[in-house]
Amino acid sequence: MPSPSLTQPITFEPIFMERVWGGHRLQEFYGKDLPSGRPIGESWEIVDRPEAQSVVRDGPLRGKSLHELWTHHRPDIFGDVPDGRRFPLLIKLLDAREKLSVQVHPPNELAAELGGEAKTEFWYIADADPGAELFVGMRRGSTRQHFEQALRRGDVAEHVHRIAVQPGDGMFLPSGRVHAIGAGNLIVEIQQNSDTTYRVFDWNRLGTDGKPRDLHIEESLRCIDFADYEPALTKPRSEILVRHDHFQVEKWKLGSKRPATTQGKVAIVFCLSGEIQCAGVTIKPGEFVLLPSSLGDSSLRASSDESELLRITIP
């Protein structure tokens, strides 16, 4: 199928997900048009899943799903991205008004056996309340036995490592790392295209239906890396926040006098602050765009003295 002329970045409609721990910060902070009165915890911004599809919002591809683009326009839009049945990343915004469950994603060697998909991910802290924290990895000195005993008592917090965060921090989460997002965090999540999560502890709370949410204790205990002690926040290397087999995330600061370019490689751009212009499209804070590999002019220009963005690419 021939591709239409690609002269602009591709924008998608977000998909809002109600979560018991969510709130309305995506509207307050980024102006997202959330459904009223519902706790929205996730905005799926770039997704190619059987159960959820990003749909193009504007331009000659309007109304097409990400999977259609991946299937029918791959060379022009995605270039030399490795082959696969679906676009390999899933990108979300998370609003944790309350803390999330303690959970884990299965590693490659166990995912298929357990009927799930492996998931490695990266969190960028876009905003955080004073005192906000993450729960990641095991607290030093804790063991699987300690963890299981705490589960039976109805509390595992003392065995999971806690780390204070502020806007601009990042955390890498390989599959197998036990984790939870603390209350008061607004997060950009970049991950493998997977939706397999095993909840091991949910703080003894009820779901939106008034019942306890399902737990996956047996699966979780098999997947958790109990030797993963007290991981640290990521340390940027120049502009690179994290580089992994599945994705690379960079943070760019743009001055108004010198544009940057991503030409020749498909990239996803997220505007953190200011406004960014690219091929006639204005990217505002909280917005994602996909820059096709064949886009003629992929220059990114700041509309103010300093604008910041995340640039996400696939190695």
Image (cartoon, grey):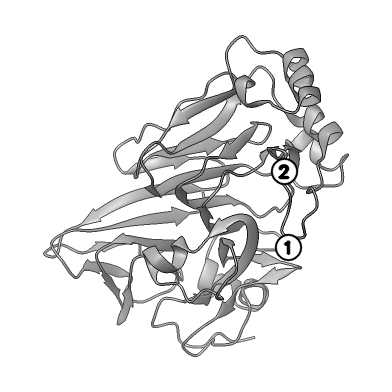
Q: Is residue 174 left or right of residue 294?
A: right
For this rendering, which residue is in front, 53 or 290? 53
Give SS at disc 1. Answer: loop
- Which one is nearer the viewer's eye here, 169 or 175? 169
Vertical side of 62 occupied by 65: above or below: above
**Circle 2: residue type:** Ala
Q: Residue at x 20, y 64 (%)?
A: 259
Within 10 angstroms of label 2, few (less than 14), some, or many (20 or more) residues? many
Sequence order check, earlier mark of 1 and 2: 1
Q: Is any part of residue 148 visible from this angle?
A: yes
Residue 309 pos. (x, y %): 33, 57
Taking depth in this image into account, of 32 and 23 the one nearest to the observer is 23
Eye-nearest disc, 1 or 2: 2
**Res 73 quadrant in image:** bottom right
Q: Which residue is mark 1?
A: 85
Q: Which residue is mark 2?
A: 118
Q: Residue at x 73, y 20 (%)?
A: 147
Q: Position of residue 48 (x, y in %)?
A: 66, 66
SS for callout 2: loop
- The quadrant holding residue 110 is top right
Pinpoint residue 238: horizontal percent, then vertical percent.
29, 38
Observer-nearest of 103 and 301: 103
